[in-house]
């Protein structure tokens, strides 16, 4: 069942040599990278939870509302970030949307433009789509397909005691707008994987502490974060100042906000030190990556924060929780 | 961002040898079938459009409401049917859901059971999931990944003048309940592809006439359907009797209802004749397939129906339309 609108747009694209059968048929047939493994991931974003659509936001003005194009870009970015966390080269995406029946055509146009801006920027094939209309809010699901050499995918369950923990850039306060302009670390991940030893990796979607706790739990280890080493994004400072009633410090925003889509890497100490000493532009031309060592992997399970006085305290693995009843 | 509930369930599954990195990481890494091409397709189903959920149906009692398990099964079946239409062997699915916040846990349990019943039945790996909760209706998106030998995928744009048109079983009236118990023709498609020449194929999701018109339009040909040869399902007779006010005949239901998920094949005449003469159980043990020749491909674009008196009339390519404004 290849309906439709996105499908029609895709068929107008120049033929991609990575496609043996292009979109518009019941399914797309890809030409895989030789000697590689397919890597697959899916993320679904819903209006009201993952984004507010312009014209439908609340009166608070925060978080900022998204244009349909930003929603399309973000949906692709979030799935590509999962591929980055596996050190996989992104190859293709397929996109499924449920559009509000009224106004859906305009939303579809802009959304598709956003999707294509992202697939263009990351050299990814838009391999298919399914467009639906309904009387509900906007929903978009992006499945990303990447490739990685056999045995070379970064996993989250291979961190080792003594590894240093690296974050690829400053975090916190992304809801002020960065969450709508996500730049997944795809090229950086592939470049790091080629030149450095990485034991485990995860991307920060739900919050540094929460995502790090997932990595350490999967690896049966723990982590100690050197709190003064955490690169706090200026947006975390701004958000703390904007919302004094929450009582959250900039550091707490950095540890808990999520939607940063930087990578957390557990690396042998010498490799981590070598990575932060390497100019990012030597790895990827024009990269905005600013890797920092923020702590170490320890044998004792759980997460601890180390204060400036050297004292350690348990760190709550807070972050965005996909709760339901 | 691999959250959650479906993820947790998946991690309890026995390890599938086709997975190098199992679900639960940021993405799954597959071991591809050697010398094959990946085939990818996505479908998204929304409550209220593609199904009514039990307890939330209208008062009419028609179409019948679905259990969450049936929704899960159907969502997988619809995507697998797209792979069947490419003659691809189904390998893996990833599933993304948006669950109503209230009652979502129960729905998630049953939905996942339905998804797994289908992946078990079709020998497919459940390679990942993304579970979301929101204040909206149920949405489920299934991406299916299959494999096919290079150059061997069935396309919809290669039908040739003189081909006979085969449908793999009786059609119409599926909304009486068959639409919730879809059996995609995956095994049949792969078996037919091995033993017969097929020029073009599509699955019937939106209606025989509409989907056939897509195949003929993509192939720059036309089709003439021998109306008395169309295998009308008993459900089409029942539905016509149940809804006399629509004025639709059983044949019109057969041509327009959709949700049949039988395949339409354009085959060289001798091959089509050989296929319908072959007992389906010789192709696939236990198959319910009942292929029938229903017409032929002609050079003149458009669809025509041939009546019993031999007269031909244009056939409207009616079916389910994914309209929005």
Image (cartoon, coloured by chain):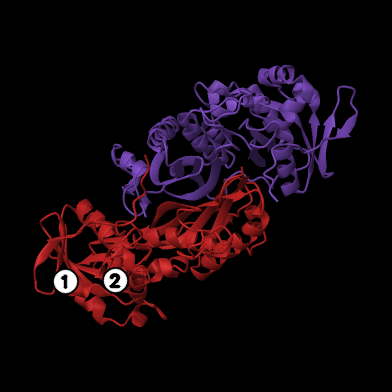
Chain colours: A red, B purple
In terms of sequence position, does the residue under pointer 1 or pointer 2 come before the other?
A: 2
Residue hosting label 2:
A250
Residue under the point 37% across and 41% down: B6
Q: Residue at x 63, y 32 (%)?
A: B259
Q: Secondary structure at mark 2?
A: helix
Q: Position of residue B272 (x, y in %)?
A: 69, 30
Single out the mark in the foreground, 1 or 2: 2
- Identify the residue position indicated by label 1 in the image: A269
- Are discs 1 and 2 located on one and the same chain? yes
Q: Nearer the viewer, residue B229 or A207?
A: A207
Residue beneath the point at 28% across and 61% down? A201
Q: For mark 1, give the secondary structure.
A: helix
How would you rate the neighbour count of disc 2 (Cα within 10 Å): few for under 14, some for 14-19, many for 20 or more? many
Residue B229: x percent and y percent?
Answer: 76, 23
Residue B198 can be seen, yes or no: no
Decide which of A102, B31 is in the foreground and name it. Answer: A102
Label 2 is found on which chain of the structure? A
Q: Nearer the viewer, residue B200 or A282?
A: A282
- Residue A163: image quadrant is bottom left
Q: CA distance from mark 1 to mark 2?
A: 28 Å
Judge from the rendering whether residue B44 lies leftward or rightward of residue B172; answer left or right: left
- In this orientation, does residue A213 appear? yes
Residue A157 rendering spot, x and y as whole percentages: 23, 54
A264 lies left or right of A77: left
> Which labelled disc corresponds to residue A93?
none
Which residue is at 80% across, 24% downward? B247
Q: How far across and how far down the image is residue B150, in percent?
A: 53, 50
Chain where mark 1 sits:
A
Left or right: B117 in relation to A210: right
């Amino acid at each position: 069942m290849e309906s439709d609108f996105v499908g029609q747009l895709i068929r107008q694209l120049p033929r991609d040599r990575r496609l043996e059968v292009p979109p518009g048929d019941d399914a797309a047939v890809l030409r895989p990278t030789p000697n590689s493994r397919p890597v697959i991931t899916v993320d679904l974003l819903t209006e009201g939870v993952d984004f507010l659509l312009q014209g439908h936001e609340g009166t608070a003005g925060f978080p900022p509302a998204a244009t349909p194009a930003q929603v399309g870009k973000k949906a692709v970015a979030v799935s590509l970030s999962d591929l980055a966390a596996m050190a996989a080269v992104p190859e293709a995406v397929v996109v499924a949307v449920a559009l509000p029946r009224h106004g859906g055509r305009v939303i579809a146009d802009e959304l598709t433009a956003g999707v294509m801006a992202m697939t263009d920027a990351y050299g990814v094939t838009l391999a298919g789509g399914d467009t639906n209309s309904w009387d509900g809010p906007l929903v978009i699901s992006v499945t990303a397909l990447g490739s990685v050499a056999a045995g070379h995918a970064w996993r989250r369950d291979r961190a080792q005691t003594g590894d240093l923990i690296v974050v690829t850039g400053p975090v916190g306060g992304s809801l002020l707008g960065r969450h709508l302009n996500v730049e997944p670390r795809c090229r950086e991940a592939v470049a790091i994987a080629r030149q450095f030893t990485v034991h485990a990796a995860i991307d920060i979607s739900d919050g540094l502490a929460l995502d790090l706790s997932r990595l350490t739990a999967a690896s049966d280890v723990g982590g100690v974060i050197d709190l003064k080493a955490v690169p706090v994004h200026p947006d975390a400072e701004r958000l703390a100042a904007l919302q004094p009633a929450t009582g959250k410090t900039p550091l707490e925003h950095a540890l808990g906000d999520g939607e940063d889509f930087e990578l957390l890497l557990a690396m042998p100490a010498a490799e981590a030190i070598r990575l932060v000493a390497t100019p990012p532009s030597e790895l990827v031309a024009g990269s905005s990556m600013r890797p920092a060592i923020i702590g170490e992997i320890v044998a004792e399970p759980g997460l601890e924060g180390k204060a400036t006085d050297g004292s350690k305290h348990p760190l709550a693995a807070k972050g965005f929780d996909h709760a339901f009843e």
